[in-house]
Amino acid sequence: MSDIKLFSEEEIREKAHLMAQNYIGGSWKNANTSNLIIREIKISPTSLIYYCSLKDDKNPSDNNKGPTEIVFRIFRMEHESDYDKIATKAIIFTLLSERKIGPKLLGIFAEYRLEEYLQGDGLTYEELSNPNISIAVATHLAKLHSLQLPIEKRITIFKETKRYLSEKLQEASSKISELISSFNLMDELEWLTNKLKSMKLSVVFSHNNLNASNIRIENNKKFCMEDRIVFLGFARCSYNYRAYDIAEYFFQWCIDCPKNPFHVEINYKRYPNLEQQLLFIRTYLTWSCWPINERNNPSNIEDHLLNELKVLRLASHLISISRTEDYSKKYFNYLDFIKARIERYFYEKKKFLQE
């Protein structure tokens, strides 16, 4: 088994260079490692992600030079089961790349992947609330949810969250453990899971991490907005209730990132109003490709989806607890963020039970 912690900076540089030479060619074919610019983009429990480019381009007018900026991803594999997970991720990424929902796949090997590098940052609040962008995201999400992928169809995200909460409860000195215990989150997750099972909810192939940083707009303005939207961050994709992605996307409107990037606030006044929600939902339903026998299903009307959102908003808040710590504790006030989402969960649960 390999562990990304064992790789030195030079080894990472050499692996990225070799893959780019073999899979991309063009300008990379005759370049040497000294011409390679490489910097870490992100580290996660499952992979390291690097930006790579070339210092010099001797043939700037060469149409066959290929991309000069790429993403190099290294997967961590510590257990036998990790091979299956990485194989599933490879299938997902490849199919989404072919359908132009995600970045282009440039090269793939057992433990590594080369991907298209997309310029820019994730969507800002102003962009999220732009009607044209909201319509484009809804269209894109409908296409994603309409896919039939050859992966497990069971919903596993709640079991994963339960396992996370159980593990954290064993850490006596953990602040996360204190939050889980004081708010009885294990009981809440059990209640919510049973509630969802009792409802007739549509299950689709889902992104499961549709935050603003995972939605990009390509710079090429020759294309319409719909064709410029690209989703990133497919590591958590699986089958799930369809309203989960929409609930998390709407919540992203509320995240306020001031000049200090380490202090993230939640401003619920920014949550999309009913008109904004309906614009998104109507577009989503219009572009969703349901089987013929499902097209007249009552669940495929906007009122039904609005009702689904009310309960899936609760799921979005609870599951975010297990999705925030490992990835975000180095970058912002994650404990305050988690506590705010827990409190919002109980606020929205009370409203849900009163209706």
Image: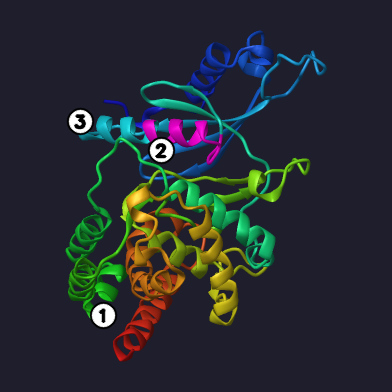
Task: Give, as a single range, the part of the protein colored magenta.
Answer: 91-103
Sequence-wise, which precedes: disc 1 or disc 3?
A: 3
Q: Callout 2: few (<14), some (14-19), or many (20+) C-alpha neighbours within 10 Å?
A: some
Q: Callout 3: few (<14), some (14-19), or many (20+) C-alpha neighbours within 10 Å?
A: few
Which quadrant is the C terminus positioned in? bottom left
User: Which residue is painted at 56% across and 60% down in the image?
Assistant: 283
The Cα–Cα distance between marks 3 and 2, rounded to whole angstroms, is 16 Å
Give the residue pinned by disc 3: 80
Which percent across, then down, holds residue 242? 38, 59
Magenta stretch, main secondary structure, is helix
Q: Magenta stretch containing residue 206, yes or no?
A: no
User: Which residue is painted at 78% across and 14% down in the image?
Assistant: 62
> Left or right: where does residue 112 sit relative to residue 56?
left
Residue most extreme to the top: 30
Sequence-wise, which precedes: disc 1 or disc 2?
A: 2
Sequence-wise, which precedes: disc 3 or disc 2?
A: 2
Q: Secondary structure at mark 1?
A: loop
Q: Is residue 214 above or below residue 195?
A: above
Q: Magenta stretch containing residue 96, yes or no?
A: yes
Which percent across, then down, holds residue 50? 54, 34
The Cα–Cα distance between marks 1 and 2, rounded to whole angstroms, is 32 Å
Out of 31 and 202, give the one closest to the viewer. 202
Q: Amino acid at mark 1?
A: Phe
Give the residue pinned by disc 2: 47
> Left or right: where does residue 196 sit relative to residue 315?
left
